[in-house]
Image (cartoon, rainbow, N blue to C red):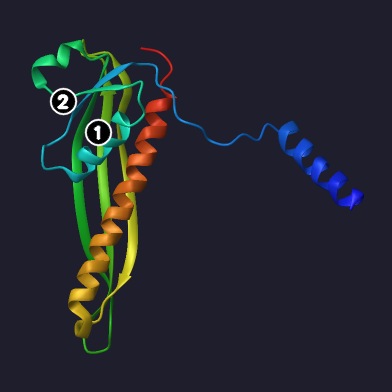
Amino acid sequence: MQRRLLLSQCAVLTLTACGFQLRGVPTFAFSSIYITAAETSALGNELKRTLASRGKLQVITDPALLSTAQAVLDITLEQREKTVVGVNASGQVREFQIRLRVRFSLRTPQGKELLPETELLQQRDISFNESAVLAKETEEGLMYRDMQSDIVQQLMRRLAAVKTL
């Protein structure tokens, strides 16, 4: 019993000594942000919700107030792609690859570049069966939503990495 306690304490000491720390809530170098994304953009809306839920960061949605924002996130491309990657002997599709490509940059309202134009890409392979078309369409939609959430989290980490305005 005492040996287990000693081993667990050694493990805790080892983890703290190596600098291990759980990822916390990101902190940003700016207190307000304006996001130039289309109103119909699912990724833009999820990003706005995620940033607004952080509490200390104000997400400005009114274009008339753009000049009051400390940072402007320009989403210049949000593209969904679907390509065939596998066919059977009779030429019927067996596998697709779906991609979500997002290109963005971060700047101040005055035009100072904080993050240069960057492209994020997520891709997944999905099998296809013509006897279960509706189920595969639903699965594809879920995969796109999962890739979108991954990209939003990557964007959050990149925005948090900006240290100076």
Q: Quadrant of the C terminus?
A: top left
Q: Quadrant of residue 124?
A: bottom left
Q: Which mark is residue 48?
A: 1
Depicted 64 relative to depicted 156: above or below: above
User: Is residue 3 shown above or below 94?
Assistant: above
Coordinates of residue 91 in the picture (x, y in percent): 21, 84
Mark 2 lies on residue: 61
Q: Which one is nearer the viewer's eye here, 79 or 131? A: 131
First reached walking from the N terminus: tag 1 or tag 2? 1
Disc 1 packing (10 Å; few <14; some 14–19; many ≥20):
many
Residue 61 visible somewhere in the drawing: yes
Please identify the residue farthest to the front as the structure is shown: 1
Give the Cα distance between marks 1 and 2: 9 Å
Residue at point 75%, 32% (across, down): 17
Residue type highlighted by circle 1? Lys
The residue located at (30%, 60%) in the rendering is: 143
Total tally of numbered discs in the picture: 2
Amino acid of disc 2: Thr
Task: Give the x, y percent position of residue 45.
Answer: 20, 39
| Image x and y of residue 106, in percent | 28, 24
96 or 8: which is nearer to us?
A: 8
30 relative position to 101: left or right? right
Q: Residue furthest bottom?
A: 90
Q: Residue at x 46, y 30 (%)?
A: 25
Q: Quadrant of residue 110?
A: top left
Which residue lies most toward the right here? 2
Q: Is residue 92 visible in this depiction of the protein?
A: no
Instruction: Describe residue 128's horizontal placement relative to residue 5 as left or right.
Output: left
- Give residue 48's quadrant in the image: top left
Residues tagged 1 and 2 counted as in contact (Cβ below 8 A): yes
Asked which secondary structure carries label 2, the reply is: loop
